[in-house]
Amino acid sequence: MAPPAIIAPSILSADFAELGKACSDTIAQGADWLHVDIMDGHFVPNITFGAPVVTKIRTHVQRPTTKHGRGTFDCHMMIAEPKKWVKDFQKAGCDLYCFHYEAAISSTAAESPEATSESKTNPKEMIRYIHDCGMLAGIAIKPDTKVDVLWDILDNPHLAERPDMVLVMTVHPGFGGQKFMASELPKVAELRKRYPDLNIEVDGGLGPGTIDQAADAGANVIVAGSAVFGAKNPGEIISKLREAVERRRGKL
Ligand SMILES: O=C(CO)[C@H](O)[C@H](O)COP(=O)(O)O
């Protein structure tokens, strides 16, 4: 059976002028995690914020007391050099550092003459490094990336190099409020079939109108930005998302 539902509102859609309050309110309204979107203007055509902001919002949300527990900061690193920022985000209070497969294998990150030893990496090494730094590790794939690239990483006999979560993007990363891409769900279904216990996160265009499809495919970690922060009653939306995942698990 799939692991329990984890609802992770994306603070990309929160009021940035009131970010600390928005984060603590969302947890009080029933969210499990906060999905923290980090964009560098290179890997994606948008910029959000960096570790200093995460340090500040951490003071508004209690650290999780268990692995994957309430208050987990799930940092989605949409950045070209994911290795470079691991330590800064760990110090800032990130609990789960989710990097993009595409960034870890790209020539910018690994092979360019400008790349320093700080920025050179590959997915397995990244996961080990994140674990060594005391965080959970996630690996994300964009819509254009085939899910097959993950088999070698997920079947790795070295536990320290295996991710704690896979994020399947259901929009092209960069902006909130985009249309959900149902075309990405076969990736989720294939992952769930192969790895019944894996935390599988979906991100982009999730809300009451699309959650059933994602839950049916087997996703259990649900990111929702505009659907939660744009709602009159965010707590009600969080409950609806959770119910859909738990119904699929046969728990309701
Ligand atoms: O990673 C993201 C964009 O790259 C966001 O987390 C995502 O798009 C959530 O926003 P929404 O729920 O409004 O689609």
Image (cartoon, helix red, strand yellow):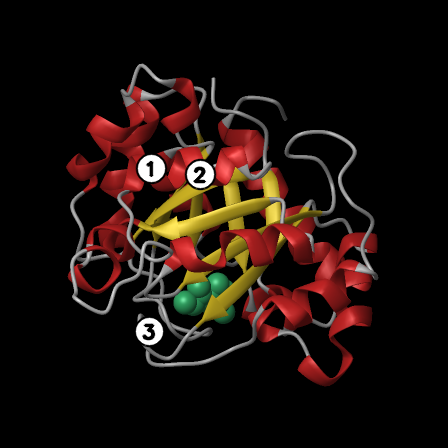
> Pointer 2: what residue?
129
Contact between marks 1 and 2 (CB within 8 A): the answer is yes
> Pointer 1: what residue?
125
Horizontal side, residue 251 vs residue 39: left or right = right
Can the viewer see residue 9 in this picture? Answer: no
Residue type at mark 1 is Glu
- The residue under the point 31% across, 70% down is 43
Label 1 and label 2: CA atoms lie apart by 6 Å
The residue carrying pointer 2 sits among few (fewer than 14), some (14 to 19) or many (20 or more) residues within 10 Å by Cα, namely some
- Which corner quadrant holds the C terminus? top right
- Asked whether mark 3 and ligand 1 are closer than 8 Å, the reply comes as yes
Residue type at mark 3 is Val
Horizontal side, residue 191 vs residue 237: left or right = left
Label 1 and label 3: CA atoms lie apart by 23 Å
Say which element carries label 3: loop
Residue 216 is situated, as x and y percent measured from the top left of the image, at 40, 36
Residue 155 is situated, as x and y percent measured from the top left of the image, at 27, 20
> Pointer 3: what residue?
44
Is 17 rendered above or below residue 36? below
Can the viewer see residue 57 in this picture? Answer: yes
Observer-nearest of 238 and 32: 32
Observer-nearest of 215 and 65: 65
